[in-house]
Amino acid sequence: MNAFDVLGDPVRRRILELLADGEQTSGAITDVVRAEFAVSQPAVSQHLRVLREQGFASVRAEGARRFYAVEAGPLSEVDAWLDRFRRFWDQRLDALETELARGKRTTRRSAGDDVGAAEEA
């Protein structure tokens, strides 16, 4: 199974999103996923198992609780694939940055004009 097969499932993507915020217990993950996707606890466990077996998540036991964490390694395959497409959005982000800078300059000039007009009055 490659990274895109793993990430192709919306439940597994959601679990990874939860783990991106920090380590989570299996119970906390199950509560969120069951509420959002209306799947059973065994189904959530199966998704966690796939993520573990494919290296996207790790688990550690603390007593009876299981804590899951995201593992970044397999995401490098996705990152490498996306790298070919970054130029498309990098150009747009650069253009947005330019427009935002222009807007700030215009706002400062307008505010300066208002202050100057108030001082003249």
Image (cartoon, rainbow, N blue to C red):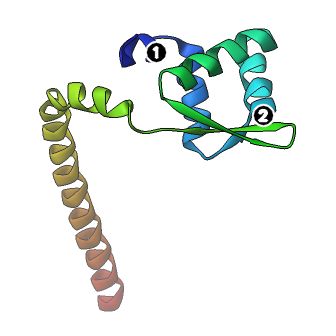
* Residue drawn at point x = 37 percent, y = 32 percent: 75
Q: Please report the residue visible at 32 percent of the width from the left and 76 percent of the height from the top.
A: 114
Question: Which quarter of the figure has residue 37?
Answer: top right
- Circle 2 sits in a helix, a strand or a loop, which is it? helix
Mark 1 or mark 2, earlier in chain: 1
Amino acid at pointer 2? Ala
Mark drawn on residue 6: 1
Disc 1 secondary structure class = helix
* Picture layout, residue 71 above or below residue 77: below
Q: Is 120 placed above or below 109 here?
A: below
Residue 102: x, y in percent?
18, 58
**How far across and down, in percent of the image, does residue 29 sit?**
72, 30
Which label belongs to residue 84? none
**Quarter of the rendering occupied by the N terminus:** top left
Q: CA distance from mark 1 to mark 2?
A: 21 Å
Q: Which residue is mark 2?
A: 28
Q: Residue at 13% x, 39% y: name it.
A: 91
